[in-house]
Image (spheres, rainbow, N blue to C red):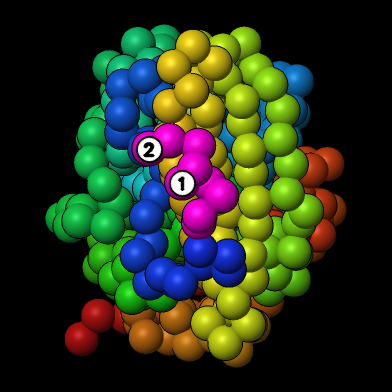
C-alpha cells in the first residue's frame, strides 16, 4: 500500500464491524510486544511490578488455598507465576507466542499449564475456583465475542467460583475515540523493527459506542505503508450487568482503587469487577 492510500482513506471509517485487531500472534510483533510487557518504565502493556503485586494480593486473599486459577490473556505469566508461588494451581492462555514461550521459561513454570490459543475459541473443561480476565481485554472484542468469552469463562468455573475481570469505563473508551491524531519518527517500534514514520488517528461511533484507532506505518527505506486498526467497545453499567447475567454470573459493583490499583495511566479508566458463577442445576 502506497502513501496515497493514506490520503484517500475513508474519514471517518466506513467499516465499523470488522473488528480487525493488531497482530498479537505475528512472531515479530509478539516479540516486540513482550518487551513492552516486561518494561518497568510504563504500565500500558502490563502494569509495573508494584501494581501487579497489589492485584495478586487482592486475588489471593479472596480464594481458598491451592485454588485452581485460569488466566485468560495471561501474557508473559506475570500473574500466574506469582499466584503459583502462593500455592495456587494455574493455567494461562494467550495468543502471543513470544509471551507464552517467555512464561514457560519462568522459574516454577513446570507447575503451570500454558496454552497458546485465542481465548475466543477456547473451551476448557474443569472446575476452576477463579478465572482472570484483566487489563480491559474484554473491551477489545466485539460484543458478540465478549458474550461468548464470558459464557465460556463461567462454564470453566465451579459453582460459586469467581471471575476477576477488569473493564474500561464507558468514558475511557469514548475518550480514545476523540484523541487527536499524532505522528512520530521511530528507529524501531511496536509495529516495525526498522526505521519508520508512525501515524495514529482515532474515531468515535456514537450509535455503536465503538472507538477506532488506525495506525499507519511508513517504512523509511521503501516508503511502503502498512495499515492496522483496533476497535474498542464501550459499555454502560447496565450493559456490563447484562453481559454478566447472560453468562450466568452474578455482578458486583466495581472494586475501589484503594483495593485494586490500576496504575497511573489507567486510574479512573479501568475497574475490577468480581462475579460469581451461579449454582449449577
| Separation of marks 2 and 1 at Cα, in angstroms | 6 Å
Q: Position of residue 140 (x, y in %)?
A: 48, 58
Magenta extent: 1-9
| 187 relative to 256 in the view: left or right | left
Q: Are marks 2 and 1 in contact (CB under 8 Å)?
A: yes
In the figure, 223 relative to 23: above or below? above
Q: Position of residue 205 (x, y in %)?
A: 59, 77
Which quarter of the image is occupied by the N terminus?
top left
Q: Does the image show residue 184? A: yes
214 or 85, nearer to the observer: 214
Q: 10 Å neighbourhood of mark 2: few (<14), some, or many (≥20)?
A: few
Query: Dot 1: what SS?
Result: helix
Q: Nearer the viewer, residue 183 or 101?
A: 183
Total marks in image: 2
Q: Is residue 2 magenta?
A: yes
Please, is residue 280 above or below residue 141 in the view? below
Q: Residue at x 33, y 75 (%)?
A: 144
At mark 2, the secondary structure is: loop
258 lies left or right of 18: right
> In screen coordinates, is 101 left or right of 236?
left
State the residue position of label 2: 1
Residue at 24% across, 34% down: 116
Res. 33 visible in picture: no
| Residue at the (50%, 55%) spot, across then down | 8
Residue at 29% of width from left, 51% of height from top?
Answer: 119
Give residue 269's position: percent from left, percent from top: 75, 59
Is residue 177 rendered magenta in the image?
no
Q: Decide which of 21, 12 is in the foreground and name it.
A: 12
- Residue 14 placement, left or right of 198: left
x, y percent for residue 10: 51, 63
Q: Which mark is residue 5?
A: 1
Amino acid at each position: 500500500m502506497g502513501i496515497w492510500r493514506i490520503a484517500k482513506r475513508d474519514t471517518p471509517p466506513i467499516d465499523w464491524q470488522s473488528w480487525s485487531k493488531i497482530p498479537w500472534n505475528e512472531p515479530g510483533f509478539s516479540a516486540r510486544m513482550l518487551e513492552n510487557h516486561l518494561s518497568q518504565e510504563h504500565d500500558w502493556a502490563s502494569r509495573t511490578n508494584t501494581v501487579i503485586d497489589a492485584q495478586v494480593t487482592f486475588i489471593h486473599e479472596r480464594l481458598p488455598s491451592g485454588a485452581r486459577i485460569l488466566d485468560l490473556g495471561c501474557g508473559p505469566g506475570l500473574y500466574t507465576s506469582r499466584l503459583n508461588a502462593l500455592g495456587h494451581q494455574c493455567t494461562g492462555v494467550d495468543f502471543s507466542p513470544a509471551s507464552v514461550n517467555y512464561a514457560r521459561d519462568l522459574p516454577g513454570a513446570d507447575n503451570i499449564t500454558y496454552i497458546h490459543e485465542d481465548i475466543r475459541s477456547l473451551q476448557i473443561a474443569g472446575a476452576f475456583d477463579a478465572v482472570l480476565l484483566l487489563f480491559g481485554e474484554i473491551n477489545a472484542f466485539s460484543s458478540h465475542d465478549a458474550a461468548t468469552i464470558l459464557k465460556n469463562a463461567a462454564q470453566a468455573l465451579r459453582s460459586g467460583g469467581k471471575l476477576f475481570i477488569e473493564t474500561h469505563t464507558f468514558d475511557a473508551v469514548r475518550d480514545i475515540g476523540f484523541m487527536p491524531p499524532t505522528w512520530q519518527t521511530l528507529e524501531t517500534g511496536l509495529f516495525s523493527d526498522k526505521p519508520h514514520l508512525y501515524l495514529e488517528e482515532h474515531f468515535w461511533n456514537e450509535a455503536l459506542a465503538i472507538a477506532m484507532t488506525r495506525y499507519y506505518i511508513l517504512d523509511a527505506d521503501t516508503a511502503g505503508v502498512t495499515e492496522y486498526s483496533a476497535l474498542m467497545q464501550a459499555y454502560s453499567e447496565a450493559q456490563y450487568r447484562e453481559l454478566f447475567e447472560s453468562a450466568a454470573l452474578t455482578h458486583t459493583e466495581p472494586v475501589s482503587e484503594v483495593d485494586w490499583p490500576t496504575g497511573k495511566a489507567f486510574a479512573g479508566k479501568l475497574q475490577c469487577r468480581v462475579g460469581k458463577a451461579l449454582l449449577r442445576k
